[in-house]
Image (cartoon, rainbow, N blue to C red):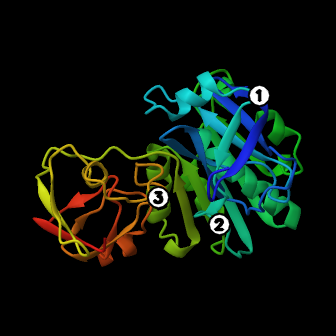
Amino acid sequence: MSAGLLSVRVNRRTREADDICSYELVSEDGSELPPFAAGAHIDVHVAPGLVRQYSLCNPPHERHRYVIGVLRDPVSRGGSRAMHDGIAAGARLQISAPRNLFALADAPRSLLLAGGIGVTPILAMAEALSAQGAQFELHYCARAPERMAFRDRIAASPFAAVSHLYFDTGESARKLDLPALLASLDRSTHIYFCGPAGFIDHVKAAAAQQQWPANQLHLEYFGAVVVESTGDQPFDVELKFSGAVYTIPVGVTVMKVLQDAGVFVPASCEQGVCGTCLTRVLEGVPDHRDQYLTEEEQAANDQFTPCCSRSKTPRLLLDL
């Protein structure tokens, strides 16, 4: 086992829907796995140099296994394709301990909103809230019934009565009327949502339209957002401790330039989602392109994600 990593075995792989499989991971030596809370994810070392983040979707009280769900992405950068094509029952993997950037708050009521494979952390939240006897509802949207993962699990769960499923196509087509749903909620409700960028933007816009308190909105992207890059310009980064200066060309990330120069920066998702590579900025103004930092944190301009963000100024001085 590598330092800081856990060795696990794929105990079971299950087809959950079209292009979606779940993987049940157990410790190789049969010991209990580290505890986790709803909303947590793990880094999965799919192959040498290929690390991806997947949310844990099993009940958080379980210590004998972790369950993740993986969508085969047609524009995969390698992670989901490698999982679907190369990882079967019996495979050995290395993973990180769970980390949580999407935790449940202490709230009297909760609304859980899931789009597509974004249901994975939401499922763990539903399990946790149900076990607590908390007041909540789950609303889950997918393109079609055959593309909705974990339907049977939800139908058989203790929270089936407060779960609502929506499809864009097929005989069961009916779409979520989000403005009406939000208007019906008690204003003390905390809202949790995860899914593709379009789904996230839809929820954020509907909540803003109804002036929902920002501190009651909790979200997590499961992939990067496409950022307009036509106006990009080269810029320099200077490292505080060595004084070295590197030019970042258009179309190349700070992370890539630094790695090529032998400068170590921890990395994981390389999409600005996980925050692993977060680096302090001592001078200059970053051009933030991540989904990890809050708007307030981005506005402070004292840190950025070199895996995807760039610079609005000709130079950034980094605390490296």
Badge 3 marks a residue whose secondary structure is helix
**Mark 2, residues whose alpha carbon is within 10 Å: few (<14), some, or many (≥20)?**
some
Mark 3 — residue?
Answer: 204
Picture layout, residue 98 above or below residue 156: below
Label 1 vs 2, first from the N-terminus = 1
Badge 2 marks a residue whose secondary structure is loop
Label 1 vs 3, first from the N-terminus = 1
Picture layout, residue 162 above or below residue 275: above
Residue that appears at 53% across and 75% down: 215
Estimate the spatial distance between the alpha carbons at disc 2 and disc 3, rounded to whole Å: 18 Å
Mark 1 — residue?
Answer: 89
Picture layout, residue 211 above or below residue 273: below
Quadrant for the C terminus, please: bottom left
The mark closer to the camera, 2 or 3, is 2
Give the amino acid at mark 1.
Answer: Ala
Total marks shown come to: 3
Between 112 and 285, the one nearer to me in the picture:
285
Mark 2 — residue?
Answer: 103
- Please provide percent x and percent y for residue 153: 82, 38
Residue that appears at 54% across and 44% down: 52
Give the amino acid at mark 2.
Answer: Ala
The mark closer to the camera, 1 or 3, is 1
